[in-house]
Amino acid sequence: MPIRAIVLDIGGVLEHTPDLGTAARWEPEFGPGWIHRVDPVFRAGEIGEITLEEVHERAAGALGVPVARFEAFMEDVWVEYLGTYNAEIADYWRARRDEGYATAIISNSFVGAREREEEAYRFSELTDLIVYSHEVGVMKPDPAIYELCLERLGLPPEETVFVDDVEENCAAARALGMSAVLFQDTAQAVRELDALLQRA
């Protein structure tokens, strides 16, 4: 079957997101190994079990710091989370949408991400569908998040290609029957997409 939909990840694909050392910079204030004490809170935020305000309150409580200090940390986190816009892959994707391909996003996300990313990059103007883990309660590589995306697109897996920078997430897509491209750099991803789309 021909490919009819191109599904992209955000962090590492639509956004360049290098490690800026945010967690390490806050270790002197939060204490050694602090990240492990708030892992359950972050996990809950990734699947939308709690609000962003609750993330701040619970994490601050776990660390024994004022909520305002954890909010300051989170402002640094958002800078790292949003990274920088990969205009080259976004422009390629937008052009394929103009040609008639359906487009979608599947993202392991965090409460507040839709608002932050919309303000920064206007992803809603690029794509037909965004599936955020914090809004649907499930994360890659769980098959359920891919199945939900396919259901909302109204397409079988064989007619979709998924692009992600994590091999485990690509493998999960392939296991469902989707094509998948492991993103290493934009030029490589475009070459592989063009081959799958049978573009000259």
Image (cartoon, rainbow, N blue to C red):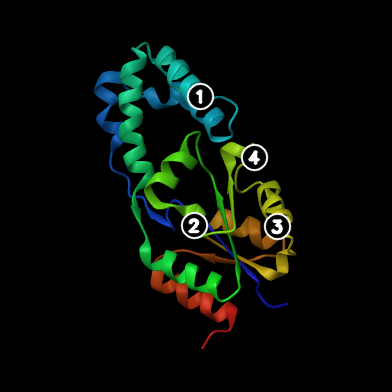
Kind of residue at disc 4 = Val
User: Is tag 2's residue or tag 3's residue first in the polypeptide sequence?
Assistant: 2
Q: Is residue 62 above or below residue 116?
A: above
The span from disc 1 to disc 4 (Cα, nearest Å) is: 17 Å
User: Is tag 1's residue or tag 4's residue first in the polypeptide sequence?
Assistant: 1
**Circle count:** 4
User: Is tag 1's residue or tag 2's residue first in the polypeptide sequence?
Assistant: 1
Image quadrant containing the N terminus: bottom right
Q: Secondary structure at mark 4?
A: helix
Residue plotted at (67% across, 53% down): 149
In the image, residue 117 lies at what x, y percent?
Answer: 43, 45
Residue 48, quarter of picture = top right
Which residue carries the number 2 mark?
Answer: 125
Q: Residues at badges 1 and 4 in contact (C-beta under 8 Å)?
A: no
In the image, residue 122 lies at what x, y percent?
Answer: 44, 52
The span from disc 4 to disc 2 (Cα, nearest Å) is: 21 Å
In the image, residue 41 lies at what x, y percent?
Answer: 50, 24
The residue lying furthest to the bottom in this view is 200
Which residue carries the number 1 mark?
Answer: 41
> Mark 4, residues whose alpha carbon is within 10 Å: few (<14), some, or many (≥20)?
some
In the image, residue 83 lies at what x, y percent?
Answer: 34, 48
Query: Which numbered marker is on residue 180?
Result: none
The residue mark sitting in front, 4 or 2, is: 2
Residue plotted at (49% across, 57% down): 125
70 or 143, which lies in front?
Answer: 70
The span from disc 3 to disc 4 (Cα, nearest Å) is: 14 Å
Query: Which numbered marker is on residue 150?
Result: 3
Kind of residue at disc 2 = Glu
Which residue carries the number 4 mark?
Answer: 136
Residue 4, quarter of picture = bottom right
Q: Secondary structure at mark 2?
A: helix
